[in-house]
Image (spheres, rainbow, N blue to C red):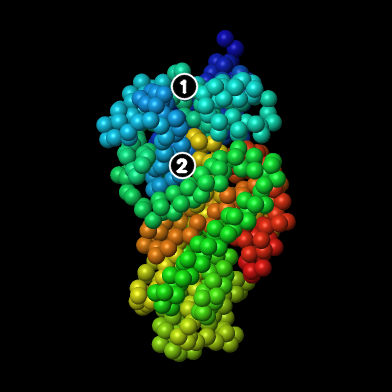
Amino acid sequence: MDKIFITFKGKKYEYDRGVRLYDVAQDFQKDYEYPIVLAVRDHKLKELFHKVNEDTEIQEFETLSGSSGHKAYKRSACMILIKSLFDILGDALDRVKVEFSIGDGYYISLKGSFDLTDEVVAKIRDRMQTIVDSDITIGKKSYPIEEVRAFFRENRMRDKERLFHYRMSSSVNMYSIEDFKDYYYGFMVPSTGYISKFDLVKYDEGLILQLPKRLSPMEVSPVSGSPKLFNTMMDATRWNEIMRIETVGELNDMISAGRINDIILVQEALQESRISEIAKEIVKEKKKFVMIAGPSSSGKTSFSHRLSIQLAAHGMKPHPIGLDNYFVPREQTPVDSEGKKDFECLEAIDIDVFNENMTALLNGKTVDMPRYNFITGEREYKGNFLSMGKDDVLVIEGIHGLNDRLSYTLSKDDKYRIYISALTTLNVDDHNRIPTTDGRLIRRMVRDFRTRGASAQRTLAMWGSVRRGEEKNIFPFQESADAMFNSALIYELAALKQFAEPLLFTIKKDDPEYQEALRLLKFLQYFLGISTEDLPKNSICREFVGGSIFDV
């Protein structure tokens, strides 16, 4: 048999022509802590079933603790669950939908003529475990697109049939476990045996599929309920159902039918109604400090302006305050484990000065409010004096707003805490959810380029650090909020598409961010684009695409 050479980390290794990447990966598995599930060959992610027929280079192997490897694990676990559901429930199951992320798991909704008892859940879990223990190869095959559409039509998967109505390619890759076939957006692990850690529990009217964290992929934490977050997500899901826009295919239908402007107006009206409800609650409870926090690109600034308008409409006198103005001098900013300045940590804020100012204002004193100069890295005082009367309320926005350590001198009775995030509930199709982090990442990429001239490559390179800061400084406090606000707009990815795609295409093949750029470009292909010309000037989407009436 002919021989080929595979280069890995500067060294050449000889293999038989046609060797599988899986077999190559096994030779290097000893150098990795966790199982290898993907390979980066010629700067592109490849699944391990691929064969190598010519001399080539492998840049890296991706394990379960890598971003793409972890996504492949979760995607594969969902496929095993869905197969198990059909195996146990059969024709009684009409629909299964992977709804959204809750903690370390996914909430799964089911529809059909069956009772979801603890006994039934146990049978489904046992079936999953049997499939895992059997270590069945996860197959992948390309089919003509008309054949794929017919398959989904025959199997009553209208969501996938509708999705591929807008697909221009001539073929589609389908995955299989034994005789079960389905479409998935993204890569899979080589076989079911890789999904060694999971749990399945009944939750509300559906299920939670609990999965490992990325950095500890061989452990599964107990399911911990997040009732406020869950209820917020379910509210959005129910609105999607009422509007009949639960998937990208249904959104594309609305765009094709010329109805997108109606959808935009209704979505914006729903958000304004929710902001008004929050303002009424603040006035009713006579709060003096509104603390707004949320992860990156949640639309905190636009939301704080719109909330201030609603508070004014209810007779209050709001004063927006950005926590960034209380940054410590730049040379005093703490550094992270990589030696880089950590602007996300609480210690980057001068919390003592912040509390002195807030306490003084509460006690009727006049305070010269600081403004942070991002060029010099220093706080400046230029006569921006503020004092509070009986109808005044401070609207404070920043990532640490829900952490009581930030406002340690202020009584909880004076504070109203709001958690805001872009909690996307639109799905690609029933079995392929859209991570909320992807929506925020695309928002940030578009805004960073527009306002700072930052490249998509820079935004992607920073995103890991941003996400680590969110996990540490924001998400642990979300359930302590008095109110949650979902800033996601069902139409926004169709609007952001035209801005994001050109930025992603600038990332070169040998850039470290190339794999993520390819993934996002493939994702955006599902959407028909829409113009932003008719978006309301106060829309949260305007914070990212431009044209807002607010100083964002």
| Residue 403 located left or right of residue 261 | left
Q: Mark 2 or mark 1, which has the lower sequence index?
A: 2
* Quarter of the rendering occupied by the N terminus: top right
Observer-nearest of 147 and 454: 147
Residue 501 lies, in percent from the top left, at 68, 45
**To which residue does mark 2 refer?**
99
Residue at disc 2, secondary structure: strand
Observer-nearest of 325 and 481: 481
The relative height of residue 545 versus residue 128 in the rendered view (above or below) is below
Residue 488 lies, in percent from the top left, at 55, 54
**Residue occupying the far bottom of the picture:** 365
**Residue occupying the far top of the picture:** 1
**Residue occupying the far left of the picture:** 119
Residue type indicated by callout 2: Glu
The relative height of residue 533 versus residue 155 in the rendered view (above or below) is below
Observer-nearest of 187 and 425: 425
Observer-nearest of 48 and 158: 158
**To which residue does mark 1 refer?**
180
| Residue 192 located left or right of residue 58 | left
Residue drawn at (54%, 22%) of the image: 154
The quarter holding residue 402 reads: bottom left
Residue 215 lies, in percent from the top left, at 41, 44
Separation (CA) of disc 2 from disc 1? 21 Å
Q: Residues within 10 Å of mark 1 (few under 14, many from 20)?
A: some
Residue type indicated by callout 1: Phe
User: Cβ–Cβ below 8 Å for labels 2 and 1?
Assistant: no
Residue drawn at (49%, 89%) of the image: 366
Query: Number of callouts in the render?
Result: 2
Residue at disc 1, secondary structure: strand
Residue drawn at (68%, 28%) of the image: 169
Residue 520 lies, in percent from the top left, at 60, 42
